[in-house]
Image (cartoon, rainbow, N blue to C red):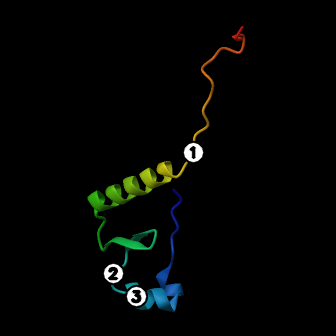
Amino acid sequence: MPIEWIDIDANSSLEALYDELVPVLVLDGVELCHYRLDETRVRSALLSTALKSLNNRTFPVKSAVSPSFRLK
């Protein structure tokens, strides 16, 4: 999962929203923590995001039959 660093001082909307809360950690639009890292909350959010991603993927099914096997 890529991490994007944003300078809130360069964006007046973000500066108004987070001015005194820096540093802020946001994942998918949800503020996870500010001032200090909340390791438990961050781990939980990352795990949840990873599980959602896995649930949305399809995996190809490979045949377990040997290529030399033929039905008679």
Q: CA distance from mark 3 to mark 2?
A: 9 Å
Circles 2 and 1, Cβ within 8 Å, touching? The answer is no
In the rendered structure, which amino acid carries the disc numbered 2? Leu
29 vs 62, nearest the viewer: 62
- Residue 2 spot, x, y in % from top left: 53, 59
Q: Secondary structure at mark 1?
A: loop
Q: Earlier in the sequence, mark 2 or mark 1?
A: 2
Tag 1 residue:
58
- Residue 37 spot, x, y in % from top left: 31, 65
Q: For the point 48% across and 82% down, which residue is it?
A: 8
Tag 2 residue:
21
- Residue 42 spot, x, y in % from top left: 34, 60
The image quarter containing residue 16 is: bottom left
Query: In this picture, is 71 found above or below 39?
Result: above
Query: In this picture, is 69 found above or below 26?
Result: above
Q: Earlier in the sequence, mark 1 or mark 3?
A: 3
Q: CA distance from mark 2 to mark 1?
A: 40 Å
Q: Secondary structure at mark 3?
A: helix
In the rendered structure, which amino acid carries the disc numbered 1? Thr
Q: Nearer the viewer, mark 2 or mark 1?
A: 1
- Residue density around tag 2, few if under 14, some if 14–19, many if 20 or more, within 10 Å: few
Is 60 displayed left or right of 18 in the figure? right
Q: For the point 40% across and 88% down, which residue is it?
A: 17
Q: For the point 52% across and 52% down, which residue is it?
A: 56
